């Protein structure tokens, strides 16, 4: 008999931190099944039964999940990738529950879609593309019939979903990823006609199989499943060529409307998956990326500098000189004895100071018009630098 789990794996202990791969545990190590004859099954919740049930297994992964640093790194990579292609991105926050992969096979009946490496729920790019297409084809009343066909052909490759694709769509829809760790919780659905859904197509005699008929005498059957609560997501769309950059922006607007009105993932008919645009986290990440780019540019510039230029930059960055202008910091360092044993370097530093002072209006002053030139700071600094230049 094929069992869901090797017998030796029953002794595995669940990690106690929040950043472990809960998806791997949830999908591969289900150990709550019971063996009966030549088959196995997962016990249903029963207050009179002490054994573990589906609810107990789902509870093993509820709570916070995802490594913050890893999620931030992937979000920054997605931002950079879409920007390099001339694309657009935006942050969205779900206003209630979100569930993805509900139809995936799993021993507890309802599956869940986990990112393979991050161990968090996500929305595949194909699902994002399908959501935008649904909005364009069925819901966007602002489009004329011809505009609708043009958008479908341009964005998705076909005018109608049933057509054989003549080309790839001109837009790339990336996977939507959580920006930060998410909270998982257990929810429940209560279908009244579970036998009808499962075996209705196999009915051979209505009189002999009343339990399979949809009727009001059936009791609801609670079915637990896993959901995401109030998560922040990063969506990105990019053009395949720069000529379609405007289409990418229009597609992002369509995505925003679709998320607000239709929702993403499963069970959208009862309000799951609705999201509102919220770019606060994305703005923060873009700020971090900008700082990293500036740091990389500064390091590149330093690598191209001569040893003397690097030494001057190090002087300017000294904590003791914080708040001073670059030329004032260099003057102070010279006064304190920097480069005193290297006349050539001293003249080069002085020439650099002169250039910096000349860039600032009124700082390089070879003649003083003050009544007391000894109190004319700019004039005195200029005389000092001119002396070093000799």
Image (cartoon, helix red, strand yellow):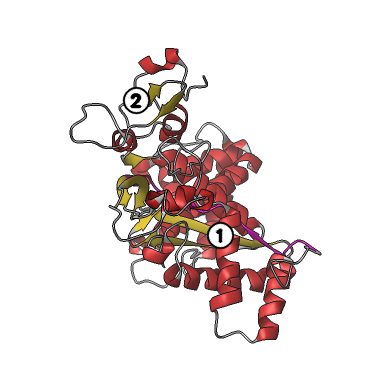
Q: Is residue 70 left or right of residue 374?
A: right
Viewed as shown, does residue 240 lie left or right of 111? right
Q: Is residue 298 above or below residue 4?
A: below
What whole-number distance in Å separates the C-alpha atoms at marks 2 and 1?
33 Å
- In this view, the residue farthest toward the top is 8
- State the residue at coordinates (64%, 87%): 144
Q: Image height check: is 257 above or below 142?
A: above
Question: Looking at the rendering, which quadrant does residue 170 occupy?
Answer: bottom right
> Is residue 323 rendered to the left or right of residue 135?
left
Residue identifier under label 2: 15
Asked if one can make out residue 327 in the rendered structure from this viewpoint, the answer is no
Task: Give the residues in magenta.
Answer: 167-184
Label 2 Cα neighbours within 10 Å, binned few <14 / some 14-19 / many ≥20: few
Q: Secondary structure at mark 2?
A: loop
Image quadrant of residue 141? bottom right
Seen from the viewer's position, the closer of residues 218 and 280 is 218
221 sits to left or right of 78: left
Q: Give coordinates of residue 212: x percent, y percent.
A: 42, 51
Task: Judge by depth and name the residue closer to the eye, 44 or 356.
Answer: 44
Residue nearer the viewer, 321 or 126: 126
Q: Residues within 10 Å of mark 1 (few under 14, many from 20)?
A: many
Residue sitting at x 65%, y 56%: 84
Q: Residue 228: x, y in percent?
A: 36, 50
Residue 111, percent from left and from top: 45, 43
Residue extending farthest left: 48
Looking at marks 2 and 1 on the same chain, the residue that comes earlier in the sequence is marked by 2
Tag shown at residue 378: none
Does the image show residue 164? yes
Query: Which residue does the image show at 62% across and 44% down from the upper left?
Result: 300
What secondary structure is marked by label 1? helix
**Residue placed under numbered mark 1 in the picture:** 128
Task: Please tell me whether residue 255 belongs to the stretch shown in magenta.
Answer: no
């Amino acid at each position: 008999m094929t069992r869901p789990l090797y017998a030796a794996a029953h002794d595995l202990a669940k990690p106690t931190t929040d950043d472990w791969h809960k998806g791997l545990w949830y999908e591969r190590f289900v150990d709550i099944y019971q063996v009966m004859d030549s088959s196995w099954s997962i016990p249903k919740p029963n207050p009179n039964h002490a054994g573990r049930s589906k609810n107990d297994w789902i509870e093993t992964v509820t709570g916070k999940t995802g490594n913050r640093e890893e999620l931030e790194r992937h979000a920054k990579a997605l931002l950079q990738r879409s920007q390099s292609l001339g694309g657009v991105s935006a942050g969205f926050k779900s206003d209630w529950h979100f569930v993805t992969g509900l139809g995936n096979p799993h021993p507890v009946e309802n599956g869940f879609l986990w990112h393979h490496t991050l161990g968090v729920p996500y929305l595949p790019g194909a699902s994002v593309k399908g959501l935008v297409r649904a909005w364009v084809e069925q819901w966007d009343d602002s489009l004329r019939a011809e505009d609708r066909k043009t958008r479908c052909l341009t964005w998705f490759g076909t005018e109608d979903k049933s057509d054989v694709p003549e080309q790839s769509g001109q837009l790339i829809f990336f996977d939507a990823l959580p920006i930060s760790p998410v909270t998982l919780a257990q929810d429940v659905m209560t279908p009244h006609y579970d036998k009808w859904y499962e075996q209705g197509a196999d009915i051979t005699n209505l009189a002999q199989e009343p339990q399979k008929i949809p009727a009001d005498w059936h009791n609801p059957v609670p079915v637990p499943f896993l959901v995401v609560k109030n998560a922040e997501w990063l969506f990105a769309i990019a053009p395949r060529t720069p000529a379609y950059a405007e289409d990418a922006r229009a597609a992002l607007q369509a995505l925003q409307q679709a998320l607000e009105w239709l929702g993403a993932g499963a069970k959208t008919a009862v309000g799951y998956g609705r999201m509102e645009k919220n770019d606060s986290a994305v703005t923060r990440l873009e700020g971090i990326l900008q700082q990293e780019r500036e740091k990389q540019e500064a390091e590149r510039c330093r690598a191209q500098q001569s040893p003397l230029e690097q030494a001057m930059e190090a002087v300017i960055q000294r904590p003791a000189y914080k708040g001073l202008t670059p030329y004032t910091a260099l003057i102070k360092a010279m006064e304190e004895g920097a480069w005193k044993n290297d006349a050539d370097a001293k003249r080069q530093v002085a020439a650099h100071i002169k250039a910096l002072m000349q860039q600032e209006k009124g700082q390089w002053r070879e003649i003083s018009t003050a009544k007391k030139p000894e109190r004319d700071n700019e004039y005195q600094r200029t005389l000092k630098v001119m002396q070093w230049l000799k």
